[in-house]
Image (tube, coloured by chain):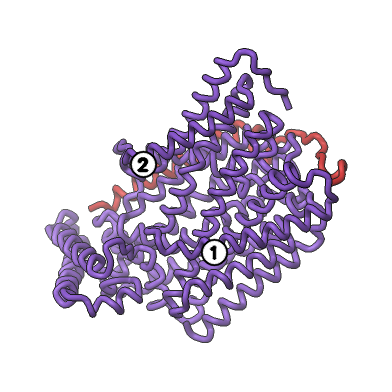
């Protein structure tokens, strides 16, 4: 394995393509989960008879 | 299987192998073979991550679980997005900047060689077993359809996967996964559409939801906290998060995937894409199982779904009695379902027909359980429900497509697994301990040989798959026996700067001992093993480091 191939350049921490910052993207993902759980719960209740 | 099904199935298999070979060309260096030259876009990595995790077992067993137990299994994935967020913020930048080929290579930089060797060995054992189970699932599929010995099927599957994985490495694996995910998505939508389309004409989609819901088949969230209950919101959020942290953060079959990203941002996006897509996808797969349940409310399901056991049961004493009670219970359930729907249409939602419908279901379940006991004490019919529906009721071409999906899912999981097993074998064991100064070309060749050897091992181990019950639980069970220890050592590495090599090494051993003790002596649900193992590793690692004040602090990498 050559030295050139075995080593990377230092990788910069780029901004996300949407929502501006990574913490905001993370918050959006967690909010999505909370919404899904709520919808699943409502869905089961709606048809539980 | 009709001729069109054969054409669709073999056409797809040939296409996937060709794609793998074509996309994997030019992987002549270790960096290209193991990391795709760090050129992969987020969507390819994300789809590949999902494809690797969604094994054939997911389709065969999960749909069956929804049929018999409702959709509670989806809670298993509730913790996954939490884990993805944590990993995006921590592991992704750390691994990328450490310039490593494997997650365990990082452990030597952070701790020492013995910790790296121990964790690599744990991974090789755990993932090697799981690779065998992932290959066994399509063998089940073909044994149902053709009556072929499952050993023949596992060999065919194994050879196809070894072909393109050993040739093209991670690049072949990733791009083949992208196409396989496209087919899987299309086939899932088709299977769902067919399950709804095949319902009687006087049963609307809303009726189907009511029939499934009244029987608890749409229950997806259980809020009651119970350590012995495998699937509730708490075990999903906490135990599932720990399992996902371990799987996506410490399992080379997943870490290697996002190490191929062209930047930290691309790798993060691939994990976050998985976080957003995985739960709806799993919900949809379970929902198909719930719709198959409703379909069989009106179309009599076989006494047993397993075709071989179904053929054998007639020879058993007591068969006639069981079959008669089953037939009677089915008729009662169908009539009660029709009465329930009539009451629903007239606005009487609390009709006694709902109670009769549930009572008939209990009788039907009792007759089915009696039939299972007649043929074998440990027999589990769940894995054959979806396959039975597909092969008996779906039209020509669609059957071939669904079977191709099951093959695709198995191939995508197995290719990722044997590729990562080969990478760890070469980078963490062979190059580190046996041949540190060979040429790049030598390591690529060693990786190809290791891929083939691990493929052969997976095929061999797959023959033990028949000894497990519901396959998906078996796979998760194997993972949970080891993941807690793996996760604990990476938590020490990332967050406990004062802990050194001895603390990490003995911490892992203590964590694994705790998990096996919990498995042997308690009834705690297996999702909690990850929590137990991780906590013990961190506690023991911290305690040992605290007691060894003179242990040199680890170098910061």
Task: Name the residue at 67% across, 19% down.
Answer: B553
**Residue positioned most to the left:** B352
Residue B9 in sight here: yes
Q: Position of residue B354 (x, y in %)?
A: 17, 58
Image height of B270 relative to B401, above or below: above
Residue B178 in sight here: no
Q: Hue of chain B?
A: purple
SS at badge 2:
helix
SS at badge 1:
helix
Image height of B250 relative to B327, above or below: above
Task: Name the residue at 70% across, 67% down.
Answer: B19
Q: Position of residue A34 (x, y in %)?
A: 44, 39
- Say whether residue B211 is left or right of residue A11: left
Q: Nearer the viewer, residue B441 or B405?
A: B441
Task: Name the residue at 47% across, 82% down.
Answer: B1
Instruction: State the CA–CA distance, disc 2 to disc 1.
Output: 27 Å
Determine which residue is flagged by label 2: B520
Q: Residues within 10 Å of mark 2 (few under 14, many from 20)?
A: few
Q: Nearer the viewer, residue B54 or B451?
A: B451
Quarter of the image holding residue B350? bottom left
Q: Hue of chain A?
A: red
Q: Position of residue B25 (x, y in %)?
A: 79, 63
Q: Earlier in the sequence, mark 2 or mark 1?
A: 1
Circle 1 chain: B
Quarter of the image holding residue B97? top right
Image height of B396 relative to B187, above or below: below
Determine which residue is flagged by label 1: B460
């Amino acid at each position: 394995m050559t030295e050139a191939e075995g080593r990377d350049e230092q990788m910069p921490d780029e901004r996300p393509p949407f929502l501006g910052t990574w913490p905001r993207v993370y918050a959006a993902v967690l909010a999505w989960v909370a919404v899904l759980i709520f919808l699943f719960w409502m869905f089961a209740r709606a048809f539980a008879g | 299987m009709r001729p069109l099904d054969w054409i669709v199935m073999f056409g797809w298999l040939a296409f996937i192998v060709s794609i793998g070979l074509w996309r994997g060309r030019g992987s002549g260096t270790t960096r290209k073979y193991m990391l795709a030259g760090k050129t992969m876009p987020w969507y390819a990595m994300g789809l590949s991550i999902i494809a690797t995790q969604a094994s054939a077992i997911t389709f065969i067993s999960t749909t069956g679980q929804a049929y018999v137990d409702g959709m509670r299994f989806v809670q298993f994935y509730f913790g996954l997005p939490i884990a993805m967020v944590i990993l995006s913020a921590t592991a992704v930048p750390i691994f990328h900047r450490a310039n490593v080929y494997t997650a365990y290579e990082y452990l030597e930089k952070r701790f020492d060689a013995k910790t790296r060797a121990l964790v690599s060995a744990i991974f090789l054992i755990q993932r090697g077993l799981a690779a065998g189970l992932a290959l066994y699932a399509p063998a089940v599929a073909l044994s149902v359809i053709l009556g072929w010995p499952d050993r023949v099927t596992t060999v065919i599957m194994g050879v196809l996967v070894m072909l393109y994985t050993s040739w093209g490495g991670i690049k072949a694996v990733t791009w083949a996964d992208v196409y396989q995910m496209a087919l899987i998505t299309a086939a899932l939508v088709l299977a769902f559409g067919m399950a709804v389309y095949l319902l009687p004409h006087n049963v609307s989609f809303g009726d189907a939801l009511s029939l499934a819901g009244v029987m608890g088949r749409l229950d997806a969230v259980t809020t009651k906290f119970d350590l012995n209950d495998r699937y509730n919101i708490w075990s999903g959020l906490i135990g599932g998060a720990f399992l996902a942290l371990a799987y996506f953060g410490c399992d080379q079959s997943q870490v290697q995937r996002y190490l191929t990203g062209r930047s930290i941002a691309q790798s993060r996006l691939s994990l976050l894409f998985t976080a957003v897509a995985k739960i709806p996808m799993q919900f949809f797969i379970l929902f198909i199982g719930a719709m198959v349940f409703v379909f069989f409310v009106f179309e009599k399901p076989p006494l047993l779904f397993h075709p071989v056991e179904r053929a054998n049961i007639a020879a058993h004493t007591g068969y006639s009695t069981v079959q008669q009670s089953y037939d009677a219970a089915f008729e009662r359930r169908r009539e009660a379902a029709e009465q329930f729907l009539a009451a629903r249409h007239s606005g009487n939602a609390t009709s006694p027909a709902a109670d009769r419908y549930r009572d008939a279901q209990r009788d039907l379940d009792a007759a089915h359980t009696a039939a299972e006991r007649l043929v074998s004490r440990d027999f589990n019919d769940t894995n054959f429900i979806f396959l039975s529906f597909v092969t008996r009721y779906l039209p020509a071409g669609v059957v071939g497509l669904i079977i191709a999906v099951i093959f695709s899912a198995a191939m995508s999981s197995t290719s990722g697994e044997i590729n990562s097993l080969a990478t760890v074998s070469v980078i963490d064991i062979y190059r580190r301990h046996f041949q540190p100064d060979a040429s790049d070309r030598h390591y690529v060749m060693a990786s190809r040989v290791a891929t083939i050897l691990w493929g052969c091992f997976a095929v061999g181990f797959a023959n033990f798959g028949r000894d497990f019950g519901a396959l998906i639980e078996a796979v998760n069970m194997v993972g949970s026996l080891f993941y807690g220890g793996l996760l604990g050592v990476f938590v020490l590495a990332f967050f406990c700067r004062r802990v050194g090599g001895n603390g990490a090494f003995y911490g892992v051993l203590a964590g694994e001992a705790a998990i096996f003790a919990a498995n042997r002596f308690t009834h705690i649900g297996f999702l909690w093993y990850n929590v137990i193992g991780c906590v013990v590793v961190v506690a023991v690692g911290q305690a040992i480091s605290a007691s060894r004040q003179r242990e040199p602090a680890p170098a910061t990498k």
